[in-house]
């Protein structure tokens, strides 16, 4: 057994509970199941060492079991200190997959676990936020010679990796799984939308109807959160720095304004911008008494917590995942989940059905990298179109949905430059 929670002493009941939940998630992951069945026969990852830094959830467990079925030697660590499901981690260890993760681990333990995963001397990496790849490039560079490639799950991680590539520092090829249409159109929009609302609801037990909800960032994740909040009767306000996204939010029926104005109106604030100090000192100063602050971006930097701490006269934990900050003028602000991913800190993350497509892309892209090792250079690649479409076809098939196909005449027409008649 592994990790310092120490799944060293086997907790049979915890592992059994995790296995049951993993099996339940598998019911909603038919595409991953199909890939696992093929991998079990073909062994495309035979003897390949994989280090994966992901949220340790039941959906991740199904991906890990698929990669193991394909012959891989996989070691896991958590991609966020609050995102681990301890019963899932225990179950993975019972399945023979080291899971170096503890829900609530401190930063020192978090990076210790990343390094433990890298001790596997990976040939492939799987990352969610690029902490594992960054550690590999900066502190474990002696291992890079082993690595043929990797995948990255998130928008945040891809931004970091493309920045690393522009600086000339990226040492091996990585496929940006987040860029697949079957990832961001579903996982980001529907998954983040539902799970963020779920996490805030579990933490607070609030009624959404009638609340003024301020969503900071209107990318695909922001789209999903706004849609779900509106569906529950909330009055949605969107803040943005990108003019096209702001225009889209307005035409989707939401109020759009600068955050300093929205800060005076909001009951609930949700950051999903992927940037630092989105909600800052000036915003805290004008928020109403009782405002709730939550983050659904990858890192806990979107809400300026040090600034909030400096403004606070006192702080106390009033419910699990809720810290009350009392300011000098007597107002109270409530921070959820320590400013970390609220959908994983207080809930279970994205539903398995959308993670089915995201993790199908992960598995197929890892297989692609092994097959095309000699062709790929140090670069951040998009998911090959054929993989993206294959995942969509498999998902439709699993839902019993058939679609039309083009006739030869129609294909010819679409590729012709001649004037239509």
Image (cartoon, helix red, strand yellow):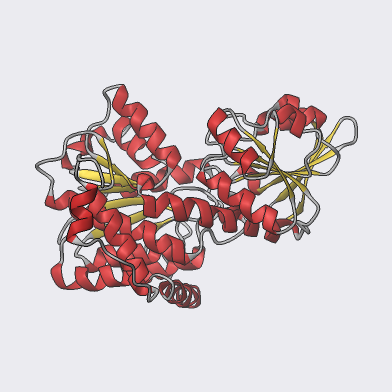
Q: Position of residue 4 (x, y in %)?
A: 45, 55
Res. 97 visible in picture: no
Give left or right: position of 212 versus 50.
right
Residue 270: image location, x then y, percent: 66, 43
In the rendered structure, the answer to whether residue 300 lies left or right of residue 141 reads right
Q: Is residue 48 above or below residue 277?
A: below
Identify the residue shown where x is 61% and y is 50%.
225
Q: Is residue 258 visible?
A: yes
Query: Viewed as shown, does residue 275 lie left or right of 380?
Result: right
**Residue sitting at x 31%, y 24%:** 166
Residue 377 drawn at (x, y percent): 17, 35
**Left or right: 206 in relation to 199:** right
Toward which corner of the image does residue 44 lie, by quadrant?
A: bottom left
For the N terminus, which image quadrant?
Answer: bottom left
Q: Nearer the viewer, residue 233 or 129?
A: 233
* Residue ID at (26%, 30%): 170
């Amino acid at each position: 057994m592994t990790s310092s929670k120490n799944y060293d002493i086997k907790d049979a009941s915890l592992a059994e509970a995790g296995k049951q939940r993993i099996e339940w998630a598998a019911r909603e992951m038919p595409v991953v199941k199909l890939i696992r069945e093929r991998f079990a026969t073909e062994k495309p990852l035979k003897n390949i060492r994989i280090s994966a830094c992901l949220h340790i959830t039941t959906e991740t467990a199904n991906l890990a079991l698929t990669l193991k079925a394909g012959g891989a030697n996989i070691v896991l660590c958590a991609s966020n200190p609050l995102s681990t499901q301890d019963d899932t981690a225990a179950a993975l260890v019972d399945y023979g997959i080291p899971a170096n993760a503890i829900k609530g681990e401190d930063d020192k333990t978090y990076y210790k676990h990343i390094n433990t995963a890298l001790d596997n001397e990976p040939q492939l990496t799987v990352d969610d936020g690029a902490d594992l790849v960054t550690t590999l490039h900066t502190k474990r560079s002696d291992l890079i010679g082993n690595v043929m490639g990797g995948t990255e799950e998130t928008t945040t991680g891809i931004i970091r990796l493309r920045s690393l590539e522009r600086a000339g520092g990226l040492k091996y090829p990585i496929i940006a799984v987040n860029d697949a249409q079957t990832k961001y159109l579903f996982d980001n929009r529907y998954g983040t939308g539902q799970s963020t609302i779920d996490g805030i609801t579990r933490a607070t037990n609030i009624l959404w109807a009638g609340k003024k909800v301020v969503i900071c960032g209107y990318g695909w994740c922001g789209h999903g959160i706004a849609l779900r909040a509106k569906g529950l009767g909330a009055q949605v306000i969107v803040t943005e720095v990108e003019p096209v996204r702001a225009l889209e939010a307005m035409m989707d029926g939401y109020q759009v304004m600068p955050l300093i104005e929205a800060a005076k109106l909001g009951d609930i604030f949700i950051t999903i911008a992927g940037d630092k100090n989105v909600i800052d000192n000036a915003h805290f100063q004008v928020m109403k008494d009782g405002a709730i602050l939550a983050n659904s971006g990858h890192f806990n930097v979107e809400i300026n917590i040090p600034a909030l701490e400096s403004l606070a006269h006192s702080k106390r934990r009033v419910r699990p995942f809720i810290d009350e900050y009392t300011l000098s003028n007597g107002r109270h602000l409530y921070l959820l989940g320590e400013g970390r991913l609220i959908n994983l800190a207080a809930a279970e993350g994205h539903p398995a059905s959308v993670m089915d497509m995201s993790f199908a892309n992960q598995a197929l892209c890892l297989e692609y990298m092994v097959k095309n090792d000699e062709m790929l250079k140090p670069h951040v690649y998009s998911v090959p179109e054929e993989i993206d479409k294959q995942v969509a076809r498999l998902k439709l098939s699993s839902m019993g949905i058939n679609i039309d196909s083009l006739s030869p005449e129609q294909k010819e027409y679409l590729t012709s430059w001649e004037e239509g008649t």
